[in-house]
Amino acid sequence: MSEDVDGKTKVFGIIGFPVKHTFSPYIHNAAFKSLKINAVYVPFAIAPKELKDAVGGLIALGVGGVNVTIPHKENVLALLDKVSAQARGIGAANVILFKDGKAIGYNTDGEGFLVSLKKDLKVGPRNKSIFIIGAGGAAKALVYVLAREGAKSIALVDILHEKAKELALKANKDFPSCETTSIPYLSSRIDEEVINADILINASPVGMRKDDPCIVSPSALHKDLVVYDLIYNPLETKLLKEAKKRRLKTANGIGMLLYQGVLSFELFTGKTAPISVMRTTLERLIKR
């Protein structure tokens, strides 16, 4: 961000409800400042019933683009003029660019996760059996990229079984070479899937609160398992603590947050993102 906001300052931001907790303004503003781009990134708290008016308002105000977070990633698609093939395939958008009065949707969540999986854990999805807990917007992005990248099988579970079932059906249709299934939300079935998985991903909110239980039985965490928890606040959920006790490869959601932000920044500006600046900013925030 430039030292002074002036008539030429470009505005970007994030829409969600709530957005008080978001780290995105810090990392994007640090990146603007680093590259001397005259732009500012701000959070917009948009209630679900205001979403349609908000998208129109952002266009009218000349905002350059926004990230989209919970609970708008899926519902915003119907309000966009154009949607990238990836966002359409996933069924969710986490980035909107505003150009010539039009709103264009993209999804950088899946690619951000993939970069983090490969860089942070040195693991790729090809020929792996993957178990994902949660079937919301983030899980949709993960299933899309993991199946596309050659995962052998993906099993899904969600407390709302219909969501997991729908996502599995869609994935099988889009990527028939990856066997995608859904299971009922029963602890015995969840543990069975964990035991049979190469990679376990928590894409649910379970673990965000101090009194949340470990989402799987610790005894199911076998020695060859890789564990990725999309939660980054707290840095270590009970699931990650149990996995670390067993010396498993683990990652929290910081990597995905960083790399989806990097890809978003590049869509917003057309410039190569200063990854080290964005990472340092994130790490500083987390240590607070």
Image (spheres, rainbow, N blue to C red):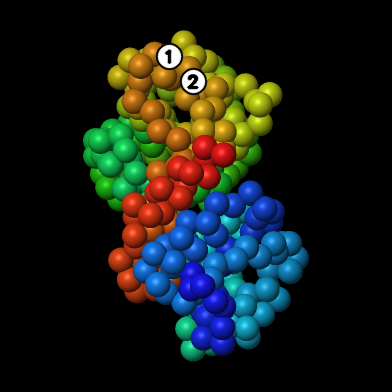
Categorize mark 2 by other alpha carbons within 10 Å: few (<14), some (14-19), many (20+).
Answer: some
User: Which residue in the rendered view is the most extreme toward the front?
Assistant: 3
Name which residue lies at 39% across and 13% down.
Answer: 246
In this picture, is 264 found above or below 193? below
Q: Indicate the secondary structure of the residue bearing disc 1.
A: helix
Q: Indicate the secondary structure of the residue bearing disc 2.
A: helix
Residue hosting label 2 = 241
For the C terminus, the image quarter is top right
Name which residue lies at 34% across and 55% down.
Answer: 275
Please give left or right for residue 208 compared with residue 262 in the image: right
Q: Position of residue 33 (x, y in %)?
A: 44, 66
Residue 245: which disc? Answer: 1
Residue closer to the observer: 287 or 68: 287
Categorize mark 1 by other alpha carbons within 10 Å: few (<14), some (14-19), many (20+).
Answer: few
Please give left or right for residue 229 compared with residue 196 in the image: right
Please give left or right for residue 213 compared with residue 32 in the image: right
In this picture, is 32 found above or below 194? below
In this picture, is 176 found above or below 29? above
In this rendering, does residue 28 appear at all?
Answer: yes
Q: Position of residue 230 (x, y in %)?
A: 48, 39
Please give left or right for residue 17 compared with residue 24 in the image: right
In the image, what residue type sits under mark 1? Lys
Q: Position of residue 7 (x, y in %)?
A: 56, 87
Name which residue lies at 58% across and 63% down.
Answer: 14
Give the distance between the C-alpha atoms of the residues marked 1 and 2, in whole angstroms: 6 Å
Q: CB under 8 Å between callouts 1 and 2?
A: yes
In the image, what residue type sits under mark 2? Lys
User: Which residue in the rendered view is the most extreme toward the top?
Assistant: 219
In this picture, is 197 found above or below 115? above
